């Protein structure tokens, strides 16, 4: 529980730091965010296939498959309405999603499910929680950066309020998930874990696959960042 609380504090701090970056003389370079996102994608894909989904499968194979499928379909369907992930908006110009209230609502929902996934990962063991936490903290930097970028022309009060709402959605989701997970039957917990794993697969794939069609964001550099994320997760598992 202590590890989870530390991760949640760092996640909130990362959101705030990411939100401050655009106004602190290029602390975060927009063109370089995709490398961080590719690195995070490597962590998410590795933890999904290496830890979360196998754990869910061991508890209830049939339920694990359906849980992962529901997560993937949910993420895909939701992103047709509003961006659940800030990657495209943060690191490149996005012409598919309106960058307004719907985008903020999408980021809030995604941030809440980040917390739900953290709460589920806490019951899968410390190495899994640390890996998911590291990916989440990296993700929160992009969340904050995106909010400030989208609301750059608005008031400081509106930007701060949006940052606070999105940042606090993660702890709320994690605490609710932890409270519920401790009371679930094995088959239901398998569904929750598989939902987390399925969302990791979707987010990781959605971050790296579109970049194959961007000359400046694809190629060996993107592959190296993704591979570094995979390697970091494998190293973490060895140390754990």
Image (spheres, grey):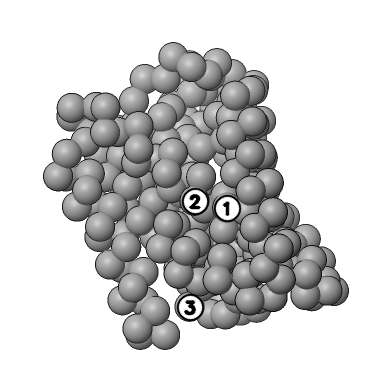
Say which residue label 2 marks: 201
Q: Position of residue 24 (x, y in %)?
A: 33, 37
* 174 or 230, nearer to the observer: 230
Q: On screen, 100 above or below 167?
A: above
Q: Is residue 123 visible?
A: yes
Q: Is residue 159 visible?
A: no
Say which residue label 3 marks: 127
For the residues labelled 1 and 3, the Cα–Cα distance comes to 19 Å
Q: Residues within 10 Å of mark 3 (few under 14, many from 20)?
A: some
* 121 or 32, nearer to the observer: 121
Say which residue label 1 marks: 198
Furthest toward the front, the residue is: 62
* 119 or 169, nearer to the observer: 119
User: Looking at the image, do the residues carrying marks 1 and 2 touch, with CB atoms under 8 Å apart?
Assistant: yes
- Label 2 SS: helix
For the residues labelled 1 and 2, the Cα–Cα distance comes to 5 Å
Q: Earlier in the sequence, mark 1 or mark 3?
A: 3
- The label shown at residue 232 is none
User: Looking at the image, do the residues carrying marks 1 and 3 touch, with CB atoms under 8 Å apart?
Assistant: no
145 lies left or right of 103: left
Residue found 69% across the figure and 54% down from its top: 66
């Amino acid at each position: 529980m202590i590890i989870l609380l530390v991760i949640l504090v760092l996640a909130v701090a990362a959101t705030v730091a990411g939100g401050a970056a655009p106004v602190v003389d290029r602390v975060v370079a927009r063109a370089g965010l995709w490398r961080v996102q590719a690195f995070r994608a490597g962590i998410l894909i590795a933890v999904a296939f290496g830890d979360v989904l196998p754990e869910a499968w061991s508890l209830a194979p049939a339920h694990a498959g359906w849980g992962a499928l529901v997560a993937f379909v949910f993420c895909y369907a939701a992103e047709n309405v509003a961006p659940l992930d800030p990657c495209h908006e943060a690191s490149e110009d996005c012409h598919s999603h309106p960058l307004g209230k719907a985008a903020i609502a999408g980021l809030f929902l995604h941030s809440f499910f980040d917390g739900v996934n953290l709460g589920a990962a806490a019951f899968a063991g410390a190495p899994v929680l640390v890996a998911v936490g590291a990916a989440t903290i990296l993700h929160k930097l992009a969340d904050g950066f995106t909010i400030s970028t989208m609301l750059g022309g608005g008031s400081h009060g509106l930007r701060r309020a949006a940052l606070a709402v999105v940042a606090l959605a993660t702890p709320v989701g994690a605490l609710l998930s932890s409270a519920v997970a401790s009371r679930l039957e094995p088959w239901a917990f398998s569904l929750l874990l598989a939902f987390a794993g399925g969302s990791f697969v979707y987010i990781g794939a959605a971050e790296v696959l579109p970049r194959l069609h961007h000359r400046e964001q694809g190629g060996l550099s993107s592959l190296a960042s993704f591979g570094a994320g995979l390697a970091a997760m494998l190293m973490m598992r060895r140390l754990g």
